[in-house]
Image (cartoon, helix red, strand yellow):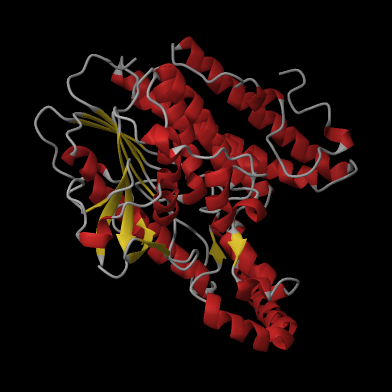
Amino acid sequence: MIDTLHPGPTAFVLAGGGAKGSFEVGALQYLVGVEGITPDIITAASAGALAATVLAQARTLPEFVQRVQEIEDVILAMTRTEQVFGQQAWLRALQGTSLGSSIAYLLTEGTRPPFPLSDATTLSGATGVTKRAHRKSQRQRQRRVFRLVAGAAFRLPRVRRRLRHSGNSALNLDPLAQALQQGGPSGIRPIDPSLIKRTGLQLRLAVTALRAGVLRYVTEDGTIVEDDACTPAPGAAGGPVELVDGAVASASVPLVFPPHPMADDDYVDGGVLQIIPVRPAVLLGATRIFAVAAIPLALARDERNYAGAPAAQIGLRAMGVIGMAHRQLENLSVELPPGTTLTTIDPVVDVVGLFEIEPGLLRINKDYGWLRAADILAGGDAAIVADTVAETHLLVESRLAAWKLEEGLWAQTRPDGSTAGTQALVRELKSHIREVVDHRKQLGFPVPEGCTAWWSEYEIHSGECPAHLLAGPGAGL
């Protein structure tokens, strides 16, 4: 347990990362629900800004616990893309074509990191390819490109016309904005700005002004302030603006979502400049800062063949994943005043894509955030803590491998000989997961409620469980 006797304000810094923010949900559940830590200051960017806007409605510990649960609902709602994201007109014109489907894939599953390599994932087809397989893959890509162009050719005039009016992005955040303002079928509860404006908590949502070319922040009362986190932007640029507009602007990833107009400027994702906004927390006087990242600070090697990859995948890796990882390190290197502490809770295993659509993977990532926060805040023997941290990463990789294998089982509506080996591997992984959790308990480390499901049940998958698998994977464990 971390010492709660501290002078000065406490700040939560919530980073950007799209659906990777599910890691932050778990970390917040531990910080608030287990440690009982509540913030006086919240600074955030991108997906973290959406979470921060929900959280900033609270003032007491019970209220914070409730709002953290609502943040989980917001993140999980992102898997229902049709209820949260709107397609721009040019992309809607490609519906039903192979090209339209490929673009949708690139935006969702195409952003998913490679599964960690293990014996199980090797057998499930998650390894690299041989030279022969590579040549076959190249031929398949060439044929696919031809089909994409041929299938969309008759719609190109219509697409070209619509590109003139909506070609600044592929998707829009209109459904999400409406849900945050009024509620909706996605299960997202509306934001109450009057609760956020109350005294007792300072909020800063990072936004990037395209016209002015500067970083700014939206505050708890809707004022837009400069990068010193305090001085209102001059004239009409200072707002005030609606807080939902500030959150949506902060989450407007360039090219994916259109710029969001506010006051006298057009704004995009604050993560363009500050993906982990520690600096405004320091400027506002925080003396105890918890920075929760969503993207690993150190990137694992990605063995995919980028020389023959689509341009979008190359751009995502170079300017997206690599660029964001390095920007995070820069943001965390801010100089701290004497007596100020910075605790960074970061993932090491990269679990989900930026726009992940599989709720099972989001659940694994959320549980990872919980465990990671518990490990980082743990005291005691350094060697034991280090071993526990290593086991946490292996546990997450085992759950990912199990999910990957189970996906293959979900595709088999009837049992056959080929699934017996896969089911045996799943049981082996579940047994390992249980051993790690039991060892963690023996050492006195906390575990989240409901963790028995990690080995006694299948992970969450789209569609109904096939009848021959209903007994579950954990029988006898």
In which quadrant will I find the N terminus? top left
Count of marks, rendered view? 0
Q: Quadrant of residue 477?
A: top right
On screen, residue 168 above or below 121: below
Measured as percent of width and height from the top left, residue 69 is found at 53, 29
Pick whichever, 236 or 42, lies toward us: 236
Tell me residue 245's x, y (percent): 43, 53
Q: Position of residue 277 (x, y in %)?
A: 28, 46
- Relative to 260, residue 431 above or below: above
Visible residue check, residue 392:
no
Camera-nearest residue between 89 and 424? 89
Query: Could you say which is closer to the camera, residue 301 or residue 14?
Result: 14
Q: Nearer the viewer, residue 69 or 104?
A: 69
Residue beneath the point at 32% across and 68% down: 210
Q: To which quarter of the image does residue 443 belong?
A: top left
Taking the spot 65% from the left edge, 76% from the top edge, the residue there is 141
Residue 261 seen in the current view: yes
- Residue at (57%, 18%) from the top-left corner? 449
Q: Position of residue 298 (x, y in %)?
A: 35, 48
